[in-house]
Amino acid sequence: MNGFFPLTLVAVVLIVLFVLERFFPLRGSTRSLLGRLFINLGLAAVMFLVAIALVQPAVRSALHWSANRPFGLVHVIALPVWLEFVMSFLLMDLAFYYWHLANHRVPFLWRFHNVHHIDPDLDVSTALRFHFGEIAFSAGFNLIQLSLIGASAWAFAAYQFVFQAEVLFHHSNLPLPIGLERVLSKIIVTPRMHGIHHSQVERENKSNFGTVFTWWDWLHRTLGLNVAQSEIVVGIPAYSLPEDNQLGNALLLPFRKQRDYWRRPDGALVERNRRSEEAGSGRLAD
């Protein structure tokens, strides 16, 4: 499949979301947009270079290997082409759920993924902000993921397009009508859902790991919906000083001694008190 057309569509999604969230923001900004764009685009530039050097060769190798062998979960039994596509799509998304979960639960991986989370505001540009180390590790993940699933090249290309567009969408600062978003959030990850994942409160940060579909969070009991956006402070408490979110510091952060992530620089632990009936709510808060 020619990659130019899907890449162009993803770029259009990025531009449209960026413009819309400037006029209709879901959450107020706390830092200069231009300063954040410089940092996020700088991290993105290094990330893309690593993706070209490591991730793309790993993906091509895995797809070529699986194309020449009837190996992988979708080849255990003979399936119609359409069902093989659907199963490949779902399994790739489930695998990304586990990869995202690992990036939060494994301390070494979290050192790198934390760079994504210390952005003090959350908008579509945050979707471009990943440390090059995390992207390098994802090359190995992609190699294992595609080899074990046995996805075809066209199933992978279709998933990648949806994956990239959805990542841009749920990182955006776009205030969808709450009724519409409550319906959408039963199927796909939405901006309010992912806003909770970027909260400074540890238990909220460790929820909503889905990338495209929300079903995996439902099944694994990691879904968090009942936090209003007005109550969310975005970022990681220990890295909330302005100098923490500078390009050089962000690039070096994984290689330095780590702080107590969930305490502010003054030592205060960031927590949220919730009423018991709210804690059991399965309804997306406004």
Image (spheres, rainbow, N blue to C red):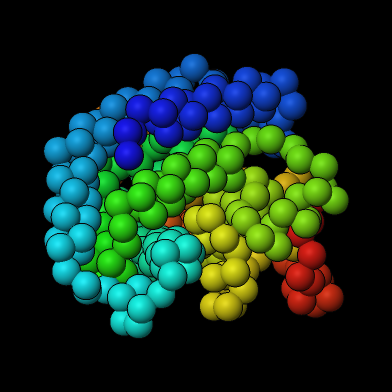
Q: Is residue 26 above or below residue 62?
A: above
**Residue 48 percent coordinates (x, y):** 27, 33
- From the viewer's side, name the closer residue of 188 and 202: 188
Residue 73 seen in this snapshot: no
> What is the residue that sits farthest to the bottom in this orientation?
77
Please give the name of the residue rendered at 16% of the width and 55% of the height, measured from the top-left corner. 64
Q: Is residue 79 above or below residue 48?
A: below
- From the viewer's side, name the closer residue of 80 and 49: 80
- From the viewer's side, name the closer residue of 50 and 248: 50
Horizontal side of residue 246 vs 23, given as left or right: left
Q: Quadrant of residue 100?
A: bottom left
Please give the name of the residue rendered at 52% of the width and 24% of the height, measured from the top-left corner. 12
Q: Quadrant of residue 76?
A: bottom left
Q: How many marks?
A: 0
- From the viewer's side, name the closer residue of 94 and 234: 94
Please give the name of the residue rendered at 66% of the width and 27% of the height, measured from the top-left corner. 21
Q: Is residue 62 above or below residue 13?
A: below
Residue 66 seen in this snapshot: yes
Please give the name of the residue rendered at 29% of the width and 27% of the height, measured from the top-left corner. 45
**Residue 34 percent coordinates (x, y):** 49, 17
Horizontal side of residue 14 vs 175, given as left or right: left
**Residue 198 percent coordinates (x, y):** 55, 50
**Residue 277 percent coordinates (x, y):** 84, 75
> What is the residue that sits farthest to the top in this orientation?
34
- Locate the N terminus by quadrant: top left
Horizontal side of residue 236 vs 255, given as left or right: right
